[in-house]
Image: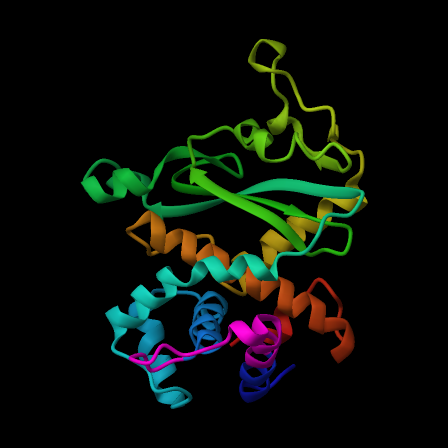
Amino acid sequence: MLQEDDIIIYLLTAIAETLGKKDRRHPLGKLYLSEILHCGVLFALKGGSFRQFHPWLQRRKMFNLPERSRLCRLLIKHHKFCNQFLATETFFNIIDSFGVEVIHPVREGRSTQSQIVSKKGKSNKRLIIGRKINVAINGELQIVDYQDATDNVCDNSFDTFYEKKQEYIYLTDNGYRKQAKYGGTPDNFKICKKGTWNDERMWVERLFSLWVRICSMKHSFHRTTKGFQAKVAYLVVLTNITFSLNESLGFHKCSLVQWAL
């Protein structure tokens, strides 16, 4: 297991190296860009609500932190830089979706804001009120692309993001099948029947399991779509950084247990 100080140093170093010359500080700001992204990655790793995370970060006395709401706005504003940490596709890639519960089904319709952020849908054969993350990973277990939508959106609505990339093959389940009258399933999609291609497709299921157990991502405390999208972006950065560092540190590549805070 890694010590907390080692986890913080490894993540900050990897973020700073990837940003390179783009790592700068606004003249009126307190944090460098790498430090802002580092706070977002630690938030994704720690899990829970941001109201609990900010005091935890303050006690570490690592950065000259702004107050909580200001830091939250910075994380949302700069999450677009997380796309620099995405990997490239390999010939075979895997796509699957992951449901995140925002509110309890009993509370459906009680808040106008929650109705904007989340909708009713199914996840793991049970109804939830939340959002859905669509993730594509390559053969090296790195995330190459991701999208999000409310949970009532069908998986096959994400097909348009990948059907133009005919040079790659995407392994999917039956949820991504599309009828001919709606355009048909893309030619570069391979619909894997139950019990086939298990060795490959189980990698994305293992990733989702790590997100649930280590990052507590099955439930979200966000009440805005932008806030939710920012946390997903930092979660992707966390996944790609840790998976790329695991082998050099002597850990299994698809593992987050040793990074738990």
Does residue 250 appear in this view?
no
Q: Nearer the viewer, residue 129 or 106?
A: 129
Q: Nearer the viewer, residue 61 or 121?
A: 61
- In the rendered image, residue 227, in percent from the top left (x then y), is placed at 35, 55
- In the rendered image, residue 31, in percent from the top left (x then y), is placed at 38, 80
Q: Eyeballing the image, is 28 above or below 130?
A: below
Q: Eyeballing the image, is 5 above or below 143?
A: below
Q: Quadrant of residue 27?
A: bottom left
| Left or right of residue 81: residue 176 | right
Part of the protein shown in magenta: 11-31
Q: How many marks?
A: 0
Does residue 9 appear in this view?
yes
> Is 49 covered by the magenta stretch?
no
Q: Quadrant of residue 186?
A: top right
Q: Eyeballing the image, is 94 above or below 26?
A: above
Residue occupying image coordinates x 43% and y 36%: 151
